[in-house]
Amino acid sequence: MSIHSVTDTQDRPAPHAPVLPKVDGLLVAVDERCDVGCKFCLRADVGRTALDLPTYARALSRCKELGATSVCLTGGEPTDHPDFVDLVKVAVQFGLACSVVTAARPGSRLRALSAVAGLLSHVTVSADTRGAQRVGATERTIGGAGEVFEALGHRRASLHVTVWQVEEADLADMGTIDDRFGAEFELSPLLMTEHQLNKATPEAVRRQYEDDIRALTTRFGLSDRFTSAVADLDASLAGRLERGCTSDRVYLSPRGMLRRCPYDKAHEVDVRLPREEVAAGVTAMHEAHVPVGSRCALVCGA
Ligand SMILES: C[S@@+](CC[C@H](N)C(=O)[O-])C[C@H]1O[C@@H](n2cnc3c(N)ncnc32)[C@H](O)[C@@H]1O
Ligand code: SF4
């Protein structure tokens, strides 16, 4: 008979312990609907279903077991979710850093955001140049984002600008945000929907991107934060996206499906399944080759 010390048995892995997949964080789309209604919206899940709290809590629990330390709430418009405040509080109770991507402006959306501002690790405020506003029929002005930064009462925030047909007035608005709040800038080219692309040749779209880069670059007096965002935008437009996804973050759809890529519905697992099946599903997602596309950086950050 052999005798093992307690330490012996604790340190040794169980003979057939499954190797669990590693998850860094969770990107949560809280609703398939969005009443903001930007006509260019490229979110992955569009329909009528909103995420429910028990499914969300289960996803946080499963992902935390797999190593997640953060959750980012997106949508749809997260501040429109009836349980938005609880979504943030539950994430914090799980010990996760909670961030939000939002199109909120003064009114009920900003009130909901303000109610949990102190709990949030980061807020990304989305805005559009005037040209992007025309394409998307949006009201997410750059200037209006100032009121959101003010209401947050902290500087853990960045301004995400969808860039199309940049005008002098857009640059002036960005300069004001830069001066007043010192916010980080994230600049994304407006990606057209299939329908919008039908009205313009790829060459014309590319020429417009180049003009926009030039307009952004020739703006003097903006901070390093701004110029490095322009450099990132330029690099992403010039770069050929040929690599596969290597993201360690997973996406939770409003219907409770976990995916690595929000758009890859061929590799998904229902988070309500037993934990072993969820872990096996996440492993299968990691093994699948999914090419990184131009939408990825916008919607997922991969
Ligand atoms: C899908 S939205 C969800 C969160 C929230 N409703 C918002 O708009 O901030 C996430 C981000 O995707 C960006 N986005 C959506 N469609 C886009 C497009 N066609 N081109 C560029 N950015 C886009 C939005 O501006 C936003 O910053
Ligand atoms: S970009 Fe955001 S605010 Fe606009 S329709 Fe899409 S989800 Fe809604």
Image (cartoon, rainbow, N blue to C red):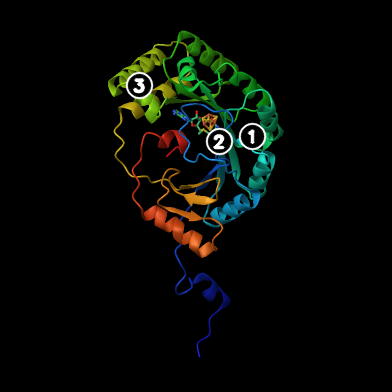
The location of residue 252, given as percent across then percent down, is 52, 47
Amino acid type, residue under disc 2 in the picture: Gly
The location of residue 41, given as percent across then percent down, is 48, 30
Mark nearer the N terminus (3 vs 1): 1
Q: Please state if 18 lies on the left or on the right of 74 as rendered.
A: left
Does dot 2 land on a helix, a strand or a loop? loop
Q: Please state if 18 lies on the left or on the right of 34 as rendered.
A: left
The location of residue 87, given as percent across then percent down, is 65, 43
Amino acid type, residue under disc 3 in the picture: Lys
Find the residue positioned furthest to the top.
Answer: 168
Considering only vertical position in the picture, is 159 above or below 180? below
Choose between 247 and 268: the one closer to the eye.
268
Question: Answer yes or no: do the residues labelled 3 and 2 have beta carbons within 8 Å?
Answer: no
The residue that mark 1 highlights is 80
Answer few, some or many: residues within 10 Å of disc 1's Cα (few below 14, many 20 plus, some between 14 and 19). Answer: many
Q: Please state if 117 lies on the left or on the right of 62 as rendered.
A: right
Mark nearer the N terminus (3 vs 2): 2
What is the distance, in whole Å, between disc 3 and disc 2 at their CAs? 26 Å
Question: Does the image show residue 158?
Answer: yes
Does dot 3 land on a helix, a strand or a loop? loop
The answer to whether the beta carbon of the residue marked 2 is less than 8 Å from any atom of ligand 2 is yes
The residue that mark 2 highlights is 76
Q: Residue at x 50, y 9 (%)?
A: 169
Question: Answer yes or no: do the residues labelled 2 and 1 have beta carbons within 8 Å?
Answer: yes
The location of residue 170, given as percent across then percent down, is 49, 13
Answer few, some or many: residues within 10 Å of disc 2's Cα (few below 14, many 20 plus, some between 14 and 19). Answer: many
The residue that mark 3 highlights is 199
